[in-house]
Image: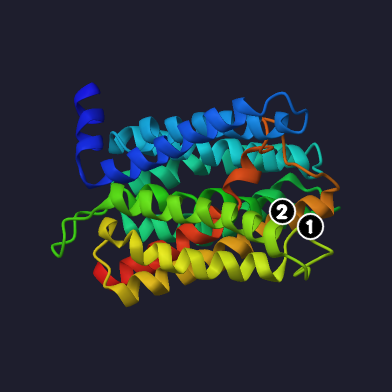
Amino acid sequence: MLEALFGLFSGKTGIFLGVIFALLSFASVAVHGVMRHKSSKELKDRVNSWWIIVLAFVIGAMLNTTVAMFFFGLISYLALKEYFSLIPTRLTDRRIIFYAYIAIVFQYYFAAIEWYGMFIIWIPVFLFLFLPFRQVLIGDTKGFLENTSRVQWGLMMFVFGLSHLAYMITLSPVKENGSGGVEFVLYLILLTQLNDILQYLWGKSIGKRKIIPKVSPNKTVEGFLGAFFTVSLLAVAFSSLTPFAWYEALFAGMLISAAGFIGDVVISMVKRDIGVKDSGNLLPGHGGILDRIDSLTYTAPLFFHYLNYLYY
């Protein structure tokens, strides 16, 4: 494991990981320097949680492909569990939810063995057809359509969407520059998370016009546009992690920024519908798993298929 860790930091990902850890170190020092202010408590929690998130990602997703399957599968499980804990369910729905959890194992198994055909249809086709029939066998007609749809939607977002990260990490290096799965996943997650942060920073600094006030009142037009253009440029700057030409990287940045925004506000809409601010409290300063991976539910499948179309 130590050999793999040293290899990771000595490769082309090493510079990017080094910068990330340097920025986190700087943020930790800066936050502790202002801890006498009461308002910095949430900021300290955020920075501490980022340390946990980054370390978990490096160890769980980047060292070994097999471990990465379990890591991303665990993320899907926690996200789906958090989602089911928020939405209203009936007693009879527990049987259907059980099959939803079992589906995670098969989805990530298909990713691990690189069986693209089953990976791409297991949830959208087989589970989509099976779950309603299982509800029919239970025989509880009240709320059939609503409750079946909730389970299927959760599977599509938090298992099918996120599992594209797992399949992406299995992709073989591209001849153009030797970039492969690990670099692609790092590129995607780095830009997706920067997009969230930059939307917040641009919105706080120059934001005036609300973009979707009823869904996410803190998001502004200026915040979205500032992040959109910044992430598009960063996608080109970080393109050494990919085989992209500059124009392909530019489009990738535009895709990730726009899709990340949509994923964020869609999950915000779910929380507004349910009546909660945060999906949980697993990550102090951030909320729950859904609050952290909301953008990835959109960026992961879209970026994967963009990459797959261009190079595979």
Residue 125 location (% of width, % of height): 51, 62
SS assignment at label 2 = helix
Relative side of 203 to 73, left or right:
right
Task: Examine the rendered structure and indicate whether residue 236 appears above or below residue 247.
Answer: above
Specify the amino acid type for callout 1: Glu
- Rendered residue at 28%/44% (across/down): 15
Query: At 82% across and 65% down in the image, what residue appears?
Result: 213
| Label 1 packing within 10 angstroms: few (<14), some (14-19), many (20+) | few
Residue 211 lies, in percent from the top left, at: 75, 70
Q: Is residue 127 visible?
A: no
**Coordinates of residue 37 in the picture (x, y in percent):** 75, 28
Residue 210 pos. (x, y %): 78, 68
Q: Residue at x 46, y 31 (%)?
A: 25
Circle 1 — which element?
helix
Q: Could you say which is closer to the camera, residue 113 or residue 237?
A: 237
Q: Nearer the viewer, residue 265 or 200?
A: 200
Quarter placement of the C terminus? bottom left
| 201 over 206 or under it: above or below | above
Q: In the depicted view, which residue is nearer to us: 90 or 7? A: 7
> How many discs mark residues in the rendered view?
2
- Mark 2 burial class by Cα count in 10 Å: few <14, some 14-19, many 20+: some
> Depth check: 189 or 29 in front?
29
The amino acid marked with disc number 2 is: Arg
Q: Could you tell whether 140 is left or right of 71 in the image?
A: right
Residue that badge 1 annotates = 146
Query: Which residue position holds label 2?
Result: 150
Mark 2–mark 1 CB contact (< 8 Å): yes
Image quadrant assignment for residue 289: top right
Colouring used for the render: rainbow
